[in-house]
Image (cartoon, rainbow, N blue to C red):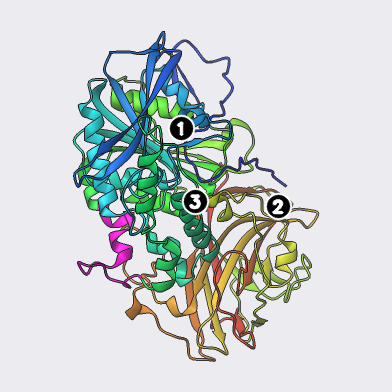
Amino acid sequence: MKRFGFLVILLVVMIGSVSFPATAQDNDRVSRPGVYRGYSEAMYDEWVRESRYVEVRDGTQLAVDIYRPAVDGVPVDDPLPVLWTHHRYHRANVSDDGRVIGIVEARPSLQTMLKHGYVIAAVDVRGGGASFGTRRGPFTPEEAQDAYDMTEWFAAQPWCDGNVGMYGLSYLAITQYMAASTQPPHLKAIFPMMAMYDLYDFVYHGGILHENFVLMWGTGNVALDNLIPAAPVDADTDQTLLKAALKEHRQNWNIYDIALANPYRDGAATSDNTPIYNEFGPANYLDQINESGVAIYTLAGWYDMYPRDAALWFNNLTVPQKIVFTPWSHNGSGGFDIAVEHLRWFDYWLKGIDNGIMDEPPIYYRVMGAPGEGAWRFADQWPLPAEQPTPYYLAAGPAESVDSVNDGLLSLAAPTDESGQDAYTVDYTTTTGRTTRWTDGYGGGFGYPDMTANDEKGLTYTTLPFAVDTEITGHPVAHLWVSADVFDFDVMVYLEEVDARGQSTYITEGILRASHRDTQDAPWHMFGLPYHSGLSDTVSSVVPGEIVELVFDLHPTSNIFDAGHQLRITITGADADTYLTPEQDPPPTITVYRNADYASYIVLPVIPAE
């Protein structure tokens, strides 16, 4: 089975780099993903760091690190473009031996940008790091206004030529969208990597709390804000200012507490009667972002937390944009040169170098399992125009592929019998493990185990071995007819690839709480995917014994299922290490129907072989 390498890091951001090898066809002037020369040359080989406070409009002091290219230890006088990040997880720290480890020291690939004539900066968000202020949640309007102020402050400095861009991963990616929503005149381009689209959908996807991640996210932030001091600014030699800032952090809100208190999208209105998920939700500022005209290069990962979010950003943005889908988890890297892409992007938008990056198709994606250079492909639109939505129906077994509760088949043929169904008593110990796409989001590591042990505790439906390599690229959508002996329950669907030895590899997943089953018109373009709003008046319990349809999408993927391998769908009622499913005593029994009247199936985005 295919193997993927991933780099595990803590919740810090920056830019990693692994280069494509040059080919014999390369010449002195090349610009394509992973290869860039002849357009922009490295001009500097040293830099200096300065750290200081900057006051924003309401008087709050924000801690800022500034790295400027230098010659003989002296910063160059030439005005240069500025690239900065709005940092949630400490712009700089102090090592055990007293050294300051800032953003450039932590991520040497940023040195590429410095060498090519960019000023690099990092700003602690208000209420975090060494900055003053308090936080009432993530991605607040006041934090976005801080980004406006800082952008314009950078643009006004004599060492800035008036062109400003932003970079960063995860929270530091989302702050870029929020900055663009405030429309700073000098913000020209951003490069968000692995970014959330809708806050409610992330915290309560399908109505189910992402408890492990949200708990670790909230707990980790409390520690960073109160117990793990960031590096002080240069002038704060006795740390008096740092200590004063930390006192203000004590009033920060915890996202986990917010989530527990607000299970619905319209819960906990703020002082101006705006629901909290709307006020703090990046997608709710889509119109302002589009009005900004800021050019956006989005980076996503098939095993990240946010590949669906990235697709939503791409299909709802009207600004100049590009997107790349890598085979990475949240903190993964390898096989794609991020530093080169940052340089190509910002050279074009901040320096006016016509390097052809905007002449390329806007989508670049990796097909996992595809051989050689053909694994990386361009596309003009998403979902792919060649996609053939193909229903695979749940059917009776045995598939003789796994010793599961039912060992069912997954078939292209629709059911014709009138009584097919499978009963499943929820096993609350089912889990995808403790190194998942979600744990990697907070630095907990990535690497799914063989899923067979989990499959054995659930309902499985497995295809016969594929006769030829089969590509699935896009968004699978589950259509399940179910009933239960309780008023509410959770359903998890996993898509897996099973090799000739029987090892089952996780590919993607989707989840839905039955009470959130009703679909509504989305406030944004969903390209045909079902939308479950999470509004309190759309949630309704299930009548025990009533047959209802659950329709929900799985996170998008792009994968070759090898000839001789099988595709498996596993259904469970819990994921103990990931989601918060209330345990009922006795555990509920869920019945999944697979007959002529109630045909359950999953629609797979099959890409025909050329």
Q: CA distance from mark 1 to mark 2?
A: 50 Å
Please give the label number shown on residue 467: 2
Q: Which quadrant is home to the C terminus?
A: top right
Q: Residue 148's x, y, as percent?
A: 23, 41
User: Image check: 80 left or right of 550?
Assistant: left
**Do residues under tags 1 and 3 come within 8 Å of each other at their CB atoms?**
no
Q: Which residue is mark 3?
A: 227
Residue drawn at x 74%, y 62% as measured from the top left: 452
Identify residue type, mark 2.
Answer: Ala
Helix, strand or loop at label 2? It is loop
Q: Along the line of sight, which residue is nearer the eye, 458 or 218?
A: 218
Magenta run includes residue 268? yes
Q: Nearer the viewer, residue 151 or 208?
A: 151
Query: How many marks do you count on the picture?
Result: 3
Task: Please give the range of residues in magenta.
Answer: 265-286
Residue 299 in picture, x, y percent from top left: 44, 41
Q: Is residue 217 left or right of residue 359?
A: right
Q: Which residue is mark 1?
A: 103
Disc 1 residue crowd, few under 14, some 14–19, many 20+, Cα 10 Å: many
